[in-house]
Every structure is written in C-alpha cells, then in structure tokens.
Image (spheres, grey):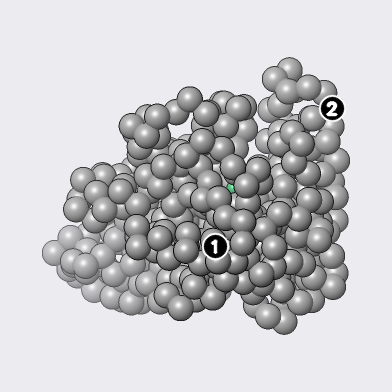
C-alpha cells in the first residue's frame, strides 16, 4: 500500500480541485481511499510537494504505426519497422500523460501482437490500449494503402472480414464512412462504406461487446454512419444540427480530433502547397462553428487526436484540451471528454478514467493548476503514473 499526499487533486468527475488531498493505492494498482489533511499512515509515503494531480488522459483515436513526418502514408514501411516505431510512439504517448488509448487503424495489425507482448510484461513504459487492427474500408477508399486496410465491398464481405479480425484478436472496430480532408481524389463529401456494410460491422462488434468508430468528416457519410448505429463519429467536422440531435438521442459520441486540423496551418507552411494549408485553415474555421453547435445540442465529446497524421505528433494530446475550450467548454468539461466520456465510449469506465476509489491509479503530476489554464497540462517534464507506479 502506498499513500500519496500533499497535493491538489482534480479527480476528473467533479468540476473542482480538492486542496491538501491524499490517496492510497494498493498492490493491484487501484485506489483504495482518498481524503484531505493528514493521511492514515502506510508503509510507503510519497510527498507530492503541493503539486497538482489529475487523471491520465484517454485518447480514443491514435495511429501508432503512422509517421507524422511522412506525407505519403509512409508506404515503404515494413512490418518490423512498424512494430518498433509503434512501440516508441506508445511510450511517447504515455510520457505526454496518455495512460489509456484506442488505436483507430493499425498497419499490419501490429497492435494485436504488441498488446500480447504488453500482457507478458515485454513492452515497458506503454499505456493501456485497445487494438483495432487495420481499418475496414472500401476498395479505393480512405485508408486503402499497403497493409493498412481491410477491403470490403458488400455486407457479406464485411461480415467475413470482421469475424476474421475478431479471430485475430482485435478489441475494437474502425470503419470508413467518408473520404478525407487532406487526401488527393478523396473528398470528405464522398460517402464510402454503405449504411448496410457498416451496420453489419456494428452488429458483429456488438455481439462481442466491442465498439465501432466511424471515420466520417462530411455528409452524407455522417448520416450513413449514424443510421448504421456506430458508437462514435470520428472527426465529424460537418455534423449538422439534425445529426447532432440524433447523436444526443441515440448516445453516439463525437471525437473531434481538433489538433489534427490545427497542426496543418500551424506547422504546414513551407512544407505543403499553399492551397492545402488554406483548405485546412478554412475547414478548421467551419469545424469550430459546427461542433460548437453540436456541443450546445447535447452531443457527448471524447478526446482523440488522430496522432500520426501529418505534423500530428505523439506528444500533442495535452494540446487538444485548449482547442476543446474553443467549442464553449470549461477546462473541467474539456478534461471530462477524456476522464468521463472517453472511458464510457470504450466501455472501461468501471476501471479507468477518473481518480475514484476502486479504479486504477493512472495519473499525472503537474506543477501548475490544470483547471486555471489548459496550457498547464502541456508540461513536458510532468510525472506520469500507471497503477501508482511512476513511469515517467
Ligand atoms: Zn484517424
């Protein structure tokens, strides 16, 4: 049993800090008690010196085999390179404060093998994660690249492919409902997988109590994915008020991946054609308007960054929260996209997300108050703990 004391605690459930807080963590890594003032003595005492404690982040949308410095989808990557690269990126995510993540499309399905190694204790300093394997997409669709897509062109092909993927060992499903914003000859207004194809994915995944994420940037693809019953819309940049109402009513989450759009105008000048930088900047302006409306209409937002897309590094998750406040959220509401909504979407809220008794003690220690300013979570030398063990 270890007691951490002398800290200001934001537990991710409430909207405020608890000053002069302490908490105990047992041998299995779970929180067993919490309080304020002088802690009950245990064999190990850790003085946090008046710093701030908050939950580790959940990031529900990453691509750990993708290289943010490569603009061709790093097509030359071998499976060995993908595995080593993915391991380094998992470690970078944990160092930035991400203690749980969901992959949303993985080359060569290497996440499945990596998770087996992690379970055997052979992947040190990596966060908890749900695997996705390769994304399900149509022939020629978004994500149809070497070793990156499960190509399906009918409901029957979807059923077969998804059953094979579950046999392989994936934990979650990613389907492609529309084209993408930055890809040539592939536009976000293009619907891709059909409602019927995606519905089969939802049916098979839900039989196994697994969740389905749909890449859906524009219309009519967002509507198709909602009608198919997916659990989350990823990106959702052009969500309409009617779609937002449907999402709130049927409890479909929205993962806005704002940082993925923000980095293109911020870092792309001189690396990308001017028209592409302008297109991304315009899309970001539209996104803020559409998603602010969706938030007002009661849509639940999650935290996901699309890490691995151009310029979108594996250390940037903390910057997503400042962008979420541009949708009208308070800092606490922005963090709850991670601590509450992301954990609920992934079905892990009994064990992860908030710092409450009974859950795993996955947390970060910060010098400055995260509720005073979202910039305070972007601290490069923060302390990161998994189950009460310091990892960084
Ligand atoms: Zn993505």
Tell which of 332 and 238 is nearer to you. 238
Q: Residue furthest top?
A: 270
14 left or right, relative to 86 = right
Asked if residue 16 shows in the view, the reply is no
Residue 177 got which mark?
none
* Residue 135 locus on image (x, y percent): 53, 52
In this view, the residue farthest toward the bottom is: 249
Q: Which residue is drawn at 46% across and 78% down?
A: 207
* Image coords of residue 139 (percent x, y): 62, 47
Looking at the rendered image, the disc whose residue lies closer to the viewer, 2 or 1, is 1
Crowding around mark 2 (Cα neighbors within 10 Å: few <14, some 14 to 19, many 20+) is few
The residue closer to the viewer here, 285 or 197, is 197
Residue at 82 percent across and 44 percent down: it is 283
Location of residue 372 with respect to 336 vertically, above or below = above
| Pointer 2 residue | 275
Query: Picture quarter containing residue 243?
Result: bottom right
Which residue shows up at 78% across the image and 51% down it? 190
Location of the C terminus by quadrant is top left
Q: In this rendering, is residue 226 above or below 96?
A: below
Give the quarter of the figure containing the N terminus: bottom left
Residue that carries the numbered disc 1 in the rendered image: 158
Residue at horizontal 57 percent and vertical 71 percent from the top: 200
């Amino acid at each position: 049993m270890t007691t951490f004391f002398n800290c200001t605690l934001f537990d991710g459930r409430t909207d405020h800090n608890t000053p002069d807080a302490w908490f105990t963590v047992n041998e299995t890594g779970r929180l067993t008690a919490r309080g304020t003032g002088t802690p009950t003595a245990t064999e190990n005492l850790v003085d946090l010196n008046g710093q701030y404690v908050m939950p580790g982040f959940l990031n529900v949308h990453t691509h750990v085999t993708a290289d943010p410095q490569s603009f061709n989808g790093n097509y030359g990557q071998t499976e060995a390179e993908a595995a080593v690269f993915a391991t380094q990126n998992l470690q970078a995510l944990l160092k930035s404060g991400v203690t749980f993540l969901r992959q949303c499309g993985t080359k060569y399905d290497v996440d499945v093998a990596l998770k087996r190694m992690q379970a055997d204790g052979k992947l040190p300093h990596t966060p908890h994660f749900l695997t996705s394997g390769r994304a399900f997409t149509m022939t020629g669709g978004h994500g149809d690249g070497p070793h990156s897509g499960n190509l399906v062109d009918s409901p029957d092909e979807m059923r077969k492919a998804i059953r094979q993927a579950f046999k392989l060992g994936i934990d979650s499903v990613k389907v492609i409902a529309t084209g993408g914003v930055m890809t040539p000859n592939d536009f976000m207004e293009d619907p891709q997988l059909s409602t019927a194809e995606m519905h089969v994915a939802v049916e098979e995944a839900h039989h196994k109590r697994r969740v389905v994420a749909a890449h859906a940037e524009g219309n009519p693809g967002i509507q198709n994915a909602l009608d198919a019953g997916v659990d989350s819309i990823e990106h959702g940049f052009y969500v309409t008020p009617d779609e937002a109402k449907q999402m709130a009513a049927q409890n479909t989450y929205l993962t806005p991946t704002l940082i993925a759009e923000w980095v293109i105008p911020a870092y792309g000048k001189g690396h990308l054609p001017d028209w592409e930088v302008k297109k991304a900047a315009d899309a970001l302006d539209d996104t803020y308007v559409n998603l602010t409306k969706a938030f007002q209409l009661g849509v639940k937002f999650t935290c996901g960054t699309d890490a691995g897309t151009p310029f979108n590094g594996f250390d940037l998750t903390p910057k997503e929260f400042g962008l979420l406040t541009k949708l009208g959220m308070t800092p606490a509401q922005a963090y709850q996209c991670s601590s509450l909504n992301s954990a609920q979407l992934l079905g892990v809220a009994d064990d992860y997300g908030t710092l409450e008794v009974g859950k795993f003690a996955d947390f970060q220690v910060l010098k400055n108050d995260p509720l005073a300013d979202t910039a305070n979570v972007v601290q490069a030398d923060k302390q990161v703990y998994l189950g009460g063990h310091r990892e960084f």
